[in-house]
Amino acid sequence: MNVTMIPLAELTPNPKNVRLHSAKQISEYKRSVEKFGQTKAIVCDENKTILIGNGLYEAMKALGMTEAACFIKAGMSESDKLKMMMADNKIYSLGVDNLEMIEGIIAQLGEVKDFDIPGYDADLLETLTFDAVSADDFMGDYGLLDTETKDDMKRAAARYQEEEAAFVASAEELTPATPGGPLEREGNGSSPPPDIGAGLDEKAEGTAGIALQRRFLVCPKCGEKIWL
């Protein structure tokens, strides 16, 4: 197989690529290229359209690299190009991780505390090497918030309380003139019944645009506010 260096600017991503590349995957691809360099060739046709390696191409381009090692597969029919693209992705996905072997490798890496492996979360891998004491210490800190986060939560809670208090203070209490009779505004027995549909455009500060009417009744039995 003859591999040649081709400028990335001359390569064309395949518009029929059957693999979607997430931002996370491209990010890990970049980590891999930065750590190990290009470890496999990009396969393209004689027109320099990529058949295998679109994700690798995107990562190398994002890193500002200018050329890539490529294998040109010439003379293929359009049908065979599509089949090869599909076969490459499908055959790869049929593989199964050897968990026992992976566990052994993680344990070996744990001896030198080096879990910088593209595609894996280093902190997660480290937890897999914990002994009982380390695991207990780790779980003892689970869910604890740092001081800055706690302060942010306290400030948010205080702000919400102020907004709620301001909203309640600006609300208008309505009372029935007689049992079962029309509602009247408190303090004005001659006022006409309020338009319950009015005020829908009024919005309380901090409610993210949720329309709220600033009117309520007080339940004669329990004393709770009934918002209208």
Image: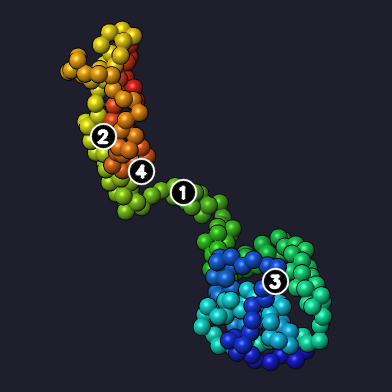
User: How far is the residue under mark 1 from the one under mark 3?
Assistant: 45 Å
Disc nearer the start of the sequence (3/4) = 3
Q: Amino acid at mark 2?
A: Phe
Q: Is residue 84 visible?
A: no
* Residue at the (32%, 38%) spot, across then down: 201
Disc nearer the start of the sequence (4/1) = 1
Q: Which mark is residue 16?
A: 3
Depth-wise, is mark 2 or mark 1 nearer the camera?
A: 2
Q: How many marks?
A: 4
Disc nearer the start of the sequence (2/1) = 1
- Dot 2 falls on a residue whose secondary structure is helix
User: How far is the residue under mark 3 from the one under mark 2?
Assistant: 56 Å
- What crowding class fits label 4: few (fewer than 14 Cα within 10 Å), some (14-19), or many (20 or more)? few
User: How far is the residue under mark 4 from the one under mark 1?
Assistant: 36 Å
Q: Which mark is residue 21?
A: none
Disc nearer the start of the sequence (3/2) = 3
Identify residue for label 4.
209
- x and y, in percent, of residue 56 in the image: 62, 77
Q: Which mark is residue 167?
A: 2
Depth-wise, is mark 4 or mark 2 nearer the camera?
A: 4
* Residue at the (74%, 64%) spot, across then down: 93
- x and y, in percent, of residue 156 in the image: 30, 45
- x and y, in percent, of residue 60 in the image: 57, 80
Depth-wise, is mark 1 or mark 3 nearer the camera?
A: 3
User: How far is the residue under mark 3 from the one under mark 4?
Assistant: 43 Å
